Amino acid sequence: MSTFDFLLQGLATALDPMILFYALIGVTLGTAVGVLPGIGPALTVALLLPVTYGLDPAGSLIMFAGIYYGGMYGGSTTSILLNTPGESASIVTALEGNKMARAGRGGPALATAAIGSFVAGLLATLALAFLAPHVVKLALVFGPREYFALMVLAFVTVSSAFGDSALRGLTSLFLGLALAVIGIDQLTGQARLSFGVPQLLDGIEVTTLAVAMFAIGEALFVAGQGASLQDKAIAVKGSVWMTRSDWGRSWKSWLRGTAIGFPIGAMPAGGADIASFLSYAAEKRASKHPEEFGHGAIEGVAGPEAANNASAAGTLVPLLTLGLPTTATAAIMLAGFQQFGLQPGPLLFATNPQLVWGLIASLLIANMMLLVLNLPLIGLWVRLLTIPRPWLYAGILLFATLGTIGVNPSPVELGMLLIFGILGYLMRLFGYPIAPIVVGLILGPMAEQQLRRALAISQGDLTTLVDSPVAASLLALSAVALIVPLIMRMRGKGGVLAQMAGDED
């Protein structure tokens, strides 16, 4: 069957009324959490993991993907109207979009962000549909050593791509790997590091760790900062619609942003923040009005927002085809797959094609839903900014605790939720990234199993790990992945920081 046939089958799955309902919930929640500063899609998906435990796998995963896309959309509203980027990927949008809002052009800034996100999301999702089967064909030749090399690449990727320090990322990763060895050894059946606690024999629950790290840790961190002053949201003046000149200056930026964002999102060392910074630099070079940059250039909103959303679809390429998460939200979505006994990778396309293609097709529908939600309901989203932070984070703590109790009503589980929550708070306090510890817990057992299988087949010969061209290439790519994010950050952010410094002068 061709990709078109699979996509049509996926659309038939995605048009089911219940699936549409799940997608609508996802994009609405995603937009809402994108608007609220400090609450990202990763935190929301983590909170919903326990709640969706007994639901339909397809509906739950489509809802998670909708939250991911919606979070990217909603972040632009906060950046433009409040000058408070919810995530690092929205920093550039705040740089130009807030200047437009202060000049009374907040409406066109929000419109170009929403339409650009729609265009980029649509094109990037189609690229995902046509690229994924080719990646799957390559991955089907993988044996134990190739899978181990792929796990090493995943470990290096999340360690170097998150945060500003690769050393801190690796420290966080090794914490996750240490937690991953707790429980019963899959090959020998021996208990490891359970300390006589029966609840630890099954290992640490990924759901508990994810909720604690992303929700409890974030709430404690915000509470620890105290009542910091916040900028007042700027009211949207005049029409939301763009002028003919705005359209003429935006459409090329949308296409350029998509072309930059999708491949960078699909790269093991990529990410939406890198894509948005590089898109901004490209727009400044390509613009016929470079003097407007730093004073409210619409291209500086259109391009980075398109790159931001295209990278979200690009992130799903390695996640669905190889089981390789390249963002914090992708790591939590990987936990969501495993919650239903599913392992993303080439075999998922063969064993559960209805789920995978339904998920891809639902992203096309979710993009249309998001455009309808974002343009007419801007006033509603702005009102969310008035929710007091104490109420917001108290609700998150309550929801996280009730969700964990619902999945596993155990005092030990609640104790681990508190301990990991405090650990998440301390890691944020000292600048350690959160995603690597979750990825270490999820992929650690798989990496150990594949390594031991490869060594058993070769009778303990370590050179077998580099004998295969694929495995050797993946390990070499892992070495490159330690260096590339640092270089890309320096190149992409250098121009933006120089621009910001010039604005301050």
Image: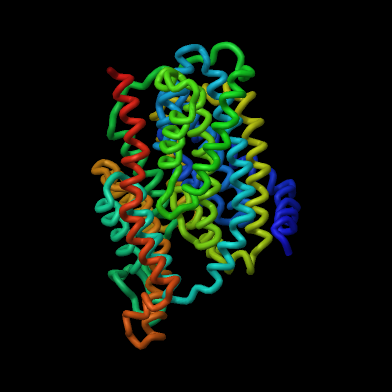
Quarter of the rendering containing residue 280? top left
Q: Which coloring applies here?
A: rainbow
Classify residue 83 as left or right of residue 375: left
Quadrant location, the N terminus: bottom right
Residue beneath the point at 56% across and 62% down: 135
Residue beneath the point at 54% across and 52% down: 316
- Image location of residue 476, percent across then percent down: 36, 65
- Image location of residue 452, percent across then percent down: 37, 79
Residue beneath the point at 55% across and 47% down: 313
Residue beneath the point at 53% across and 74% down: 141
Viewer can see residue 321 = yes
Please tell me which residue lies in front, 483 or 338. 483
Classify residue 331 as left or right of residue 13: left
Please tell me which residue lies in front, 299 or 76. 299
- Relative to 210, say whether 299 is above or below: above
- Image location of residue 242, percent across then percent down: 61, 19
- Relative to 163, say whether 372 is above or below: above
Please tell me which residue lies in front, 297 or 170. 297
Quarter of the rendering containing residue 340? bottom right
Q: How many marks?
A: 0
Quadrant location, the C terminus: top left
Viewer can see residue 71 = no
- Image location of residue 501, percent across then percent down: 29, 24
- Relative to 240, say whether 38 is above or below: below
